[in-house]
């Protein structure tokens, strides 16, 4: 997950601060706020859409109420009173739907599970399709002339970058990273960079780090190019935007695992599939932010440009694109972070590198080895994010080489500074080659796997169970499984299928609109039709349990943090780092603590989703209109009265957004939890990959998509205006 | 007032005459709404409807309704009205930043509505430059590069446009701030940048769209003086949009007062204040200090025998407030003298009547 970006830390664009707020400019402010918020996390970009959609899809409908009210008879009036309540009025059609569904349910008696008669077994056709593709991969023109070339190009690019990185040697790479960071952000980030790369080497992970870096570089470059082009199209043409937006929105809420199988189907397991899955996963944020930036470009400036006689192209290049450059850089940052996240997960389909080491280690529950590979991932994420962030800040601010105080930075400041940087790095690389240390020297590595495993063994022996009073971690895990997960799963699976459909529809209808409700119900029904009802409900139970824990913890922390600026200051760097880390990494500590199973998967999901929830909620609570707070205080409200009567109601949109985020993020990790014994859909995907049983995996993947859609729709705060 | 004769060479076909208006607007309409429906409104039975009724009937909003006026060379033509009166739309129609729905529009006799895209760009690049309420500056460029932006669009070489821009920056009094970004400037300074950018192209007409509405009152005053000075020095034709009556009276040679997309009165400041065309205008100008706007021309009465050759002499353009001073000093009526001929006299009664807002005793006869 990506880290916070400059605009989160300061949502108001500093370049605007000197500007008077007249009615005309007021129009652009809500969007600017959206943008600031949009950067809280990758998926948070959806907020902009949510608020906008909210305006569009606000259900109207006083009409019927008024008509009822005019009848005047007491009985009718009572009924009217009931239906004038919006929720009740909305649920009426649902009751009709129930009346239709119940006979259908009676027609297929049996347990609560989805009736087999209504399911379609896709394993046969899908298996045949998979076989056909495997058989024809070397002969069919589509593969020969299109996918084949794509695949080859990807392999060549990744290999070229990898070769260059290896040839530059650890000295060259570290020097380049350090110099770039220094130029962009100063000595602190430079030292962090150098230390991070040195740590990768020390942990004996130099080669996997370079593999991951090479794969990511290629994938992110492609994702940025694709995303920028799509964003450009959407930003300039409202029609394209309307067509593209739902697709991008949906892509952003789907768990990473859902992208793996289609790629494997076409390209087979290997680097091309991994790279392309990463591209597909990392392009949407770039496209979204590009479009957002282009659309929200200050209309006044564009008009001024037109009034001076600029051609369309001049306007695009001299005004529109420069005005959007903050968002463009933000998009690149997000593409890098999502790219890293996916490049690690894609180890499951043959990406190699660090993710592969973690994957292998987790498969054999070797926490030490997993940690040795996990640390470089985290370091890479932090360093990349900070550097991209610094690049964004630097462009946002105004570089003025002439006024630079440090002599060295002035020398490195201008355009020739770039040349100098590269030259210095090349010099370092050459020096490294002369000293014959292009690979990290074997003798310099610090094997941490052994001590870590000893520590884990000690923990297993002493902390897993039997700790006085608090109990052991394994006990907690077992209790969570036994008291929360199992009853929930049993309950869901025992509940008649049509009640679940109705429930999904009702919740979506209450939270959103008719269209979201329809999508939710159809998505749930599709899961049944696909024949993966039981495992999907298993996944759902884990998601619900983890979301509940996340929200309780997140809201509690956020309410506490929102009270003091100091707490927020302390919390911010922690949240930044947490939101930077790829999903995969969270599995390592929970396996160490709780072993394998469903509870650890849920725990990883909680830890992963918590930072986003805390950040959004804190922001929402502390951005509550100060005038309203002051008014409450002046009326003598206590702190808890302020919280319950002013802050929480006014922060409602943020709270709803936090719920939505929690659901989406938790789902993503619960699915990945299939790797550490989470079972259910995630396990099906992994199993399908491991055994070459594409049909199972694809069906599970489709179910994941449906589940993602369902969960997103039922929590989408669409009616907040 | 110096007339910019060079500007006429843009269009050799235009008749070389001082009385060719810079802008000639006839029956101009701008109707917002679905294109097909909007095009039908002008001239139809809906044309006379009130805004709400029109929206009800057609789903369209008429921002500019059947507006006609000429902007003469060298004058400051002010369009004034409250927000929503269509004045900003009107000024944008002049360079087709907003496409008019119907009517005629020409610049120096050349039909603007018939221009193709290239010709229109040429018009915007060289002949009419605009200053915006919210400045419309590029935040990522320095002051100098912002001023040079118009020239850059024209394709002027870097050295040349920077030299020209530096000259303009000095002209609007921003020396020393060339390397700042707009975000580092105050509102008034930003608008000076906007003004310099418009001047850099050396346009024939300057269009101002409520340029000082977003500024503090003191800064606004300062900027108005700046514009008045520019106009005095260069005699450039200006079309000035404002919702501030005081600003309109201060700057305008002629004022068009708009309401609901129509011009309700067009005239000199004195005509607007002295003889409002209807109740709306009267209400509008009610609080104007009349003695500062009206001249002795509208307060004088025919000279009684013996009055024509004594008392202080005043020019016809003398404001009432100045005449009060002269009359108070001399203690008797003052003569209004134009080229040695006595047009009439003003006495304390007539001057007080102006201040009190009563119809001047002889105003009717003089106006006739």
Image: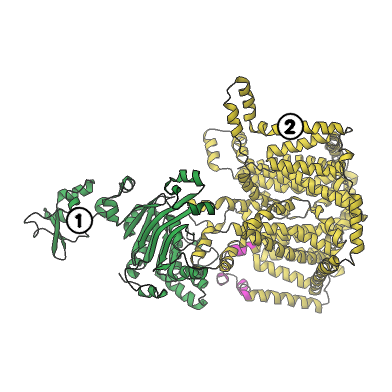
Chain colours: A yellow, B green
Q: Which mark, residue A721?
A: none
Magenta stretch: residue B15 in it?
no
Name the spot of residue B342 as percent of width and height, x first: 13, 61
Q: Specify the subunit that label 2 lies on.
A: A
Q: Tag 1's secondary structure?
A: helix
Q: Is residue B178 visible?
A: no
Pointer 1 indicates a residue of which chain? B
Residue A341 in view in this figure: yes
Up the image or down, B5 lies above or below A294; here it is: below
Residue A318 percent coordinates (x, y)? 56, 67
Q: Nearer the viewer, mark 2 or mark 1?
A: 2
Name the quadrant containing residue B202. bottom left
| Magenta region, residue range | A392-415
Between A304 and B86, the residue placed more toward the observer is: B86
Q: CA distance from mark 2 to mark 1?
A: 83 Å
Residue at the limit of the structure toward the left, as seen here: B306
Q: Local crowd at mark 2 within 10 Å, few (<14), some, or many (≥20)? A: few
Indicate the secondary structure of the residue bearing disc 2.
Answer: helix
Left or right: B170, with A166 as reference point = left
Pointers 2 and 1 within a single chain:
no
Q: Which mark is residue B296?
A: 1
Which is more toward the observer, A505 or B168? A505
Q: Farthest top residue?
A: A74
Instruction: Reply yes or no: does residue A397 show up in magenta.
Output: yes
A667, above or below A426, in the image: above
Where is the N terminus of chain A found, in terms of image quarters? bottom right
Q: In screen coordinates, is A579 left or right of A688?
A: left
Residue A96, disc: 2
**In the rendered view of the protein, which quadrant contains the C terminus of chain A?**
top right
- Residue lying furthest bottom in this view? A434
On screen, residue A640 above or below A427: above
**What percent of the width, then of the height, locates residue B139?**
54, 63
């Amino acid at each position: 997950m990506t880290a916070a970006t400059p605009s989160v830390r300061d949502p108001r664009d500093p370049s605007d601060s000197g500007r008077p707020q007249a009615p005309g400019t007021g129009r652009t402010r809500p969007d600017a706020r959206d943008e600031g918020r949009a950067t809280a996390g990758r998926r948070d970009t959806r907020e902009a859409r949510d608020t906008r959609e909210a305006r569009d899809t606000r259900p109207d409908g006083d009409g019927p109420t008024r008509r009822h009210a005019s009848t005047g008879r007491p009985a009718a009036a009572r009924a009217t009173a009931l239906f004038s309540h919006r929720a009740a009025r909305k649920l009426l059609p649902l009751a009709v739907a129930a009346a239709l569904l119940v006979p259908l349910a009676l027609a297929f008696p049996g347990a609560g599970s989805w009736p087999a008669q209504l399911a379609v077994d896709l394993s046969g056709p899908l298996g045949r399709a998979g076989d056909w593709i495997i058989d024809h991969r070397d002969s069919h023109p589509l593969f020969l002339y299109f996918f084949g070339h794509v695949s080859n190009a990807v392999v060549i690019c990744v290999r070229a970058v990898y070769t260059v990185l290896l040839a530059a040697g650890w000295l060259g790479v570290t020097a380049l990273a350090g110099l770039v960071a220094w130029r962009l952000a100063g000595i602190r980030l430079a030292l962090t960079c150098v230390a991070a790369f040195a740590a990768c080497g020390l942990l004996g992970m130099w080669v996997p780090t370079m593999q991951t870096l090479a794969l990511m570089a290629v994938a992110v470059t492609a994702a940025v190019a694709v995303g920028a082009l799509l964003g450009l199209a959407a930003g300039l043409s409202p029609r394209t935007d309307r067509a593209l937006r739902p697709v991008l929105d949906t892509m952003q809420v789907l768990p990473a695992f859902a992208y793996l199988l289609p790629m494997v189907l076409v390209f087979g397991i290997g680097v091309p599939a991994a790279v392309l899955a990463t591209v597909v996963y990392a392009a949407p944020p770039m496209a979204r932010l590009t479009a957002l930036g282009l659309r929200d470009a200050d209309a006044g400036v564009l008009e001024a440009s037109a009034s001076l006689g600029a051609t369309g192209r001049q306007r695009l290049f001299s005004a529109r694109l420069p005005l959007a450059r903050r968002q463009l850089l933000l998009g690149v940052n997000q593409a890098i972070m999502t790219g890293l996240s996916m490049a690690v997960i894609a180890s499951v389909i043959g990406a190699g590198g660090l993710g592969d080491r973690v994957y292998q280690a987790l498969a054999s529950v070797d926490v030490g080895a997993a940690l040795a590979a996990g640390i470089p991932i985290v370091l890479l994420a932090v360093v990349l994010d900070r550097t991209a962030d610094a690049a964004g800040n630097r462009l946002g601010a105004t570089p003025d080489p002439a006024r630079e105080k440090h002599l060295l930075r002035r020398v490195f400041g201008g355009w020739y500074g770039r040349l100098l940087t590269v030259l210095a790095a090349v010099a370092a690389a050459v020096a490294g080659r002369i000293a014959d240390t292009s690979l990290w020297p074997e003798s310099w590595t610090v094997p941490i796997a052994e001590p870590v495993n000893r520590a884990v063994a000690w923990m297993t022996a002493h902390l897993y169970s039997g700790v006085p009073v608090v109990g052991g971690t394994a006990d907690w895990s077992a209790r969570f499984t036994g008291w929360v997960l199992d009853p929930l799963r049993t309950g869901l699976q025992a509940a008649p299928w049509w009640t679940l459909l109705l429930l999904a529809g009702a919740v979506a209808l209450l939270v959103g609109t008719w269209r979201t409700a329809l999508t939710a119900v159809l998505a749930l029904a599709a899961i049944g039709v696909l024949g993966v009802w039981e495992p999907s409900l298993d996944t759902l139970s884990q998601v619900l349990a983890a979301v509940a824990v996340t929200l309780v913890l997140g809201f509690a922390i956020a309410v506490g943090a929102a009270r003091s600026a100091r707490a927020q200051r302390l919390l911010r760097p922690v949240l930044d780092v947490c939101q930077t880390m790829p999903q995969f990494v969270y599995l390592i500590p929970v396996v160490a603590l709780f072993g394998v199973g469903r509870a650890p998967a849920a725990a990883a999901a909680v830890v992963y989703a918590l930072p986003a929830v805390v950040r959004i909620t804190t922001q929402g609570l502390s951005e509550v209109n100060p005038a309203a707070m002051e008014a409450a205080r002046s009326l003598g409200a206590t702190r808890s009265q302020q919280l319950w009567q002013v802050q929480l109601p006014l922060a409602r949109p943020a709270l709803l957004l936090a719920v939505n985020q929690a659901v989406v993020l938790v789902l993503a990790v619960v699915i990945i939890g299939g790797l550490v014994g989470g079972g259910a859909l995630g396990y099906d995907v992994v199993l399908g990959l491991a055994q070459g049983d594409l049909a199972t995996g694809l069906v599970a993947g489709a179910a994941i998509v449906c589940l993602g859609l369902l969960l997103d729709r039922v929590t989408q705060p669409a009616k907040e205006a | 007032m110096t007339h910019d004769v060079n500007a006429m060479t843009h269009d050799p076909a235009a008749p070389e005459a001082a009385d060719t208006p810079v802008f000639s607007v006839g029956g101009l309409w701008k109707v917002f709404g679905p294109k097909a429906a909007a095009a039908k409104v002008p001239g139809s039975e809906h044309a006379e409807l009130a805004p709400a009724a029109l929206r009800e009937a057609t789903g369209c909003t008429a921002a500019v309704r059947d507006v006609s006026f000429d902007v003469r060379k060298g004058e400051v033509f002010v369009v004034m009205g409250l927000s929503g009166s269509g004045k900003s739309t009107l000024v944008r129609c002049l360079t087709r930043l907003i496409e008019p729905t119907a009517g005629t529009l020409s610049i120096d006799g050349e039909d603007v509505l018939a221009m193709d895209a290239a010709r229109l760009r040429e018009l915007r690049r060289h002949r009419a430059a605009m200053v915006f309420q919210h400045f419309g500056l590029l935040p990522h460029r320095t002051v100098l590069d912002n001023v040079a932006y118009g020239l850059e669009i024209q394709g002027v070489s870097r050295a040349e446009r920077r030299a020209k821009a530096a000259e303009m920056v000095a002209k609007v009094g921003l020396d020393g701030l060339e390397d700042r970004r707009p975000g580092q400037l105050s509102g008034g300074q930003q608008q000076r940048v906007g003004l310099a950018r418009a001047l850099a192209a050396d346009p024939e007409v300057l269009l101002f769209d409520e340029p000082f509405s977003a500024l503090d009152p003191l800064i606004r005053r300062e900027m108005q003086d700046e514009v008045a000075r520019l106009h005095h020095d260069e005699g450039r034709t200006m079309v000035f949009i404002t919702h501030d009556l005081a600003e309109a009276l201060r700057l305008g040679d002629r004022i068009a007062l708009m309401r609901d997309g129509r011009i309700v009165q067009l005239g000199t400041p004195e005509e607007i204040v002295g003889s409002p065309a209807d109740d709306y205008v009267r209400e509008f100008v009610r609080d104007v200090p009349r003695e500062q706007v009206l001249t002795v021309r509208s307060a004088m009465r025919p000279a009684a025998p013996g009055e024509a050759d004594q008392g202080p002499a005043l020019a016809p353009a003398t404001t009432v407030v100045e005449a009060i001073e002269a009359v108070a000093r001399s203690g008797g009526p003052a003569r209004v003298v134009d080229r040695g001929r006595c047009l009439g006299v003003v006495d304390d009664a007539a001057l007080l009547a102006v201040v009190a807002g009563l119809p001047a005793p002889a105003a009717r006869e003089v106006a006739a």
